[in-house]
Image (cartoon, rainbow, N blue to C red):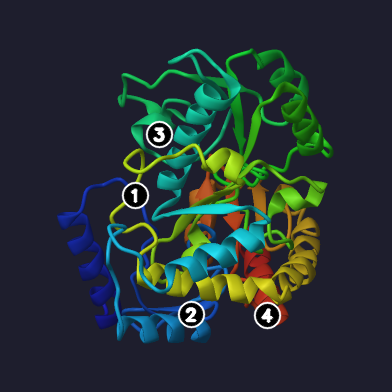
Amino acid sequence: MTTVEFRTAEALADAERWTAHNYHPLPVVVAEAEGAWVTDVDGRRYLDFLAGYSALNFGHRHPGLIAAAHAQLDRVTLTSRAFVHDRFAEFCGALARLCGKDLVLPMNTGAEAVETAIKVARKWGYQVKGVPDGQAEIIVAADNFHGRTTTIVSFSTDPDARADFGPYTPGFVVVPYGDLDAVRAAITPNTVAVLMEPIQGEAGVLVPPAGFFAGLRELCTGSDVLLIADEIQSGLGRTGKTFAIEHEGVVPDMYVLGKALGGGIVPVSAVAADRAVLGVLKPGEHGSTFGGNPLACAVGAEVVTLLAGGEFQERSDRLGARLHSGLTALIGHGVVAVRGRGLWAGVDIDPALMTGRQACERLAERGVLVKDTHGSTIRLAPPLVVTEEEIDQALAHLADVLKSS
């Protein structure tokens, strides 16, 4: 065993020894990162084509975001919501304007934001729509991924996320993703919301049929039902627009945001909606000690500034076309299918060649980091600062992996 192998092996063994085994990471131990690249403990560099499941849309250590964090660290980092700090309104107002909504409720993680959306939708249903107490229903999609809290896994169809964590929270109706007729049939007088991802990331970057969300918007409006878009992975520039649901010209009643909102520095999430929806909450009914803290707001406000100019959305659209063109060319050469939008792709590897995990391991050996999901599918989500040359480099390595199998 070489010195290089020893350092990596030692770090992996320590991680295995001291942490719960709720993840199965690739055998890479990251020590430094910059832009679209990470460097491991032995000095080997990798192209990061996962970008923290879209939490690193602006790349590792974006200079503007780092500067905003450094400046805030020298002033104040936490007050709790018992007080108001001087960055709070700035962030909430900027994000509300970006979303075209009246109000923002900041939280920390994506799962917290989804839980917030569920609570708000239920309360809106009881107080505004007039649903009988305790009878609110929310329609969700099969193969969804909205987090792993006990309430959220109650409506998951992934056995790994759901099994052995019951009893489960009632009040959710699961329908096939992209099936408008199934949603229509599932709506009852007690339906308060439809909660769906504009693109299902964990399921393999599944894009719904054209017109699905436009039809969903019309159906929800006509049935007095809230349309909630979980844009935690798909939003904030990832698909070539600020929000993935914009590809159908649709505005939801509520945005659920996270991941990239924290700039890859701190966990930041939020729910954005108009006053008629978010205004149902009163003091004491929902909150978070760290939600909307000064450091989070400083970073989040800079994220909104980066998105306001449209540069990153344009890059995702333009470079995404290059990525998808290269991936599509591999269909029939070890790739079965390619899906996605912008700088986001789900790639189905021919299962006769290898599993998705094996593809990820072989790409890592060549210096490209991606992640598998569900059998032979791998996900590519490079940061929006990636270059044409780096995309071509990753595509060439994938082609080599497929040829050598």
Crowding at mark 1 (Cα within 10 Å: few <14, some 14-19, many 20+): few
In the rendered structure, find residue 65 and report the number of the disc placed on it. 2
Query: Between tags 3 and 1, which lies in front?
Result: 3
What is the x, y in percent for residue 311? 72, 76
Quarter of the image containing the N terminus? bottom left
Q: Quadrant of residue 324?
A: bottom right
Location of residue 144 (image quadrant) = top right
Question: On the picture, is 160 further left or further right than 13?
Answer: right
Kind of residue at badge 3: Ala
Q: Report the Cα–Cα distance between label 1 and label 4.
A: 30 Å
- Checking the image for residue 340, the label placed there is none
Secondary structure at badge 1 equals loop
The disc at residue 161 is 3
**Spot occupied by residue 49 in the image (x, y as percentages of width and height):** 56, 66
Q: Which sits earlier in the primary sequence, circle 1 or circle 4?
A: 1
Q: Measuring 55% from the left and 25% from the top, which residue is drawn there?
A: 125
**Gap in angstroms between the C-alphas marked 3 and 1:** 12 Å
Q: Are marks 1 and 4 in contact (CB under 8 Å)?
A: no
Looking at the image, is mark 4 or mark 3 earlier in the sequence? 3
Q: Secondary structure at mark 3?
A: helix
Residue under label 4: 387
**Mark 2 touches mark 1? (CB < 8 Å):** no
Q: Residue furthest left?
A: 18
